[in-house]
Amino acid sequence: MINQTSVRLGSNRSVIRELFEYGKRRKAEIGEDNVFDFSLGNPSVPAPAEVQSELLNILKNSDPVAVHGYTSAQGDALVRAAIADYINSKFSVGIGADNIYMTCGAAASLCIVMNSLLNRGDEVITIAPYFPEYKVFVEHAGGTLVPVQGQKGTFQPDIQAIKGAVTPKTKAVLINSPNNPSGVVYGEDSIAQLCKILQEFSEKGQTIYLVSDEPYRELVFGGVKVPYIMNYYDKSIVCYSYSKSLSLPGERIGYIAVNPAMSECAEVYAAICGAGRALGYVCAPSLFQMLIAKAQGKTADISVYERNRDVLVKALLSYGYTVVKPDGAFYLFVQSLEPDSDAFAERAKQFELLLVSAKSFGVEGYVRVSYCVSPDMIERALPAFKALAESYKK
């Protein structure tokens, strides 16, 4: 018999992907402009102009063998050095090229890290709401995901609840800020308290790693600060992707960064290299390694997302919805107008609104609205949101 877990995962896509596929079918039936698809976190703004010009420059002026050939398994040394230099310029953590491992995006980073850290039966705590694939990544590595509910109404980490969830099997805490699906940025006080708790366990002899999933780090509004965990906790690992910051989701390029202050840094980095080898995640795309070496500090025009957020929040509040106003990412968490968020999301389809039920994110009573869409679609969708709200008042 073949692996039935893999059969199950391959036969049933994530809720997000299922809704996205439904949207494609529906658009073919009634026209693309008549469907308001807020399902997928697919950046709607183009990559920075410098990205295209640098890509053309690489293709025209670089050795084609190098452009399309293999790099070192963990990534090109010069690329890793460029990333390390940029991290140090921003956060002064003393990281070097040999603390960086190039990957095919944040998903590959997380899979590698979980397979490098976990032994069978280990537990990974995460904060709900959380990206549903965390459960897949952790379980495939032999672990168990332990969700802890965020604070009601704000979805900031509940530090005491996290502390209470720690068992002798806890190997890591996995955080995501700015958060998918809520858009919440975990504040400096929350991060400092969390790291203090983890340090207390470390001093008692239990090593708990802090893993930060950071594809949305640059997508913040109003000068909000996203704490860099290496400045707060030695046993920390960052999983980063350029998919959102540079609007390159289809190119699958990112990295893992291991805190050099970690006493066992060399061993953890070796485990990451070994897990990458075992999973076949070696030599991330060479062309895009070359690109991102030249694109450090660049971002797409995130002002579009901020305007979309502001228009949506203002309108939905006026229609009677309750929303968690996000400080980052491009997601809006909206309280469903009935207790069952699955039923609410299904009802929204009657108005051609495609909203993701928060059940798949580990919480009840909310839906995720992915507003990385055109401003025109936001405006066209507002009457549908209003009609949906009014349907509950009748």
Image (spheres, helix red, strand yellow):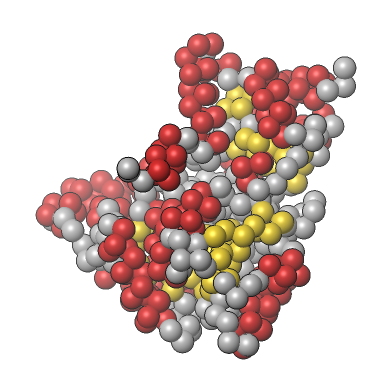
Task: Give percent across and percent down for residue 303.
Answer: 59, 45
Residue 384 visible to the viewer:
yes
Camera sees residue 294: no
Please state which of residues 189 and 309 is positioned toward the viewer in this rendering: 189
The percent position of residue 292, horizontal first and vertical second, equals 35, 57
Residue drawn at (48%, 22%) of the image = 24
| Quadrant in which the N terminus appears | top left
- Give the tally of numbered discs: 0
Identity of the residue furthest to the front in this view: 1
Left or right of residue 293: residue 94: right
Which residue is located at x 40 percent, y 43 percent? 4
Residue sitting farthest toward the top: 30
Relative to residue 301, is residue 91 depicted above or below? below
Rendered view: 25 above or below 81: above
Q: In the rendered view, would you say 335 is above or below 169?
A: above
Q: Position of residue 364 (x, y in %)?
A: 73, 42
- In the rendered image, the quadrant that contains the C terminus is top right
Residue at 21% of width from left, 62% of height from top?
71
Left or right side of 203 for 279: left
Residue toward you, 337 or 384: 337
For the residue pair 293 and 201, the one nearer the viewer reads as 201
Q: Position of residue 42 (x, y in %)?
A: 49, 39
Which residue lies at the image location 29% right of the left edge and 66% below the top edge?
Answer: 74
